[in-house]
Amino acid sequence: MDVSRQDVAGTLVAEQQIPANGKSSPIPFTMSVESSKIVDSNSYAVQATISTYGQNTFRSTNSYLVLTQGRPTTAELW
């Protein structure tokens, strides 16, 4: 999610849906982002949501800044 602008909702740059298939969390995952969607001067954040039968049952309470401006390329979401 591009979160560079404070006055508008972030812009989605990547999304991934992972079927749990009976697994419990944490569920490790990797996401790829097209480099053409990343601007070095912008800020990007990762969030996670767990849904069960279309109902959100968990959403990360923090946004984890990643990718640009010296920030990490990985994040652990809790």
Image: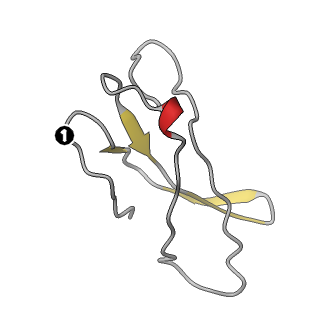
Q: How many marks?
A: 1
Which residue is at the front of the view, 9 or 70? 70
The x and y percentages for residue 58 are 56, 61
Which residue is labeled 1 in the image?
A: 70
Residue at the farthest bottom position:
22
Residue at the farthest front position:
36
Please report the residue visible at 74 percent of the width from the left and 58 percent of the height from the top.
55
Please report the residue visible at 33 percent of the width from the left and 58 percent of the height from the top.
74
Amino acid type of disc 1? Answer: Gly
Q: How is the image coloured?
A: secondary structure
Vertically, is 47 above or below 31? above
The residue tagged with tag 1: helix, strand or loop? loop
Residue at the farthest top position:
7
The x and y percentages for residue 31 are 52, 57
Please report the residue visible at 66 percent of the width from the left and 68 percent of the height from the top.
18
Q: Is the C terminus in the top left, top right, bottom left or bottom right quadrant?
A: bottom left
The x and y percentages for residue 19 are 71, 73
Residue at the farthest right position:
53
Residue neighbourhood size for the residue with mark 1, other residues' Cα within 10 Å, grouped as few (<14), some (14–19), many (≥20)? few
46 vs 9, left or right, is left
Vertically, is 72 above or below 42? below
Which residue is at the front of the view, 75 or 40? 40
The x and y percentages for residue 75 are 34, 58
Please report the residue visible at 48 percent of the width from the left and 38 percent of the height from the top.
35
13 vs 67, left or right, is right
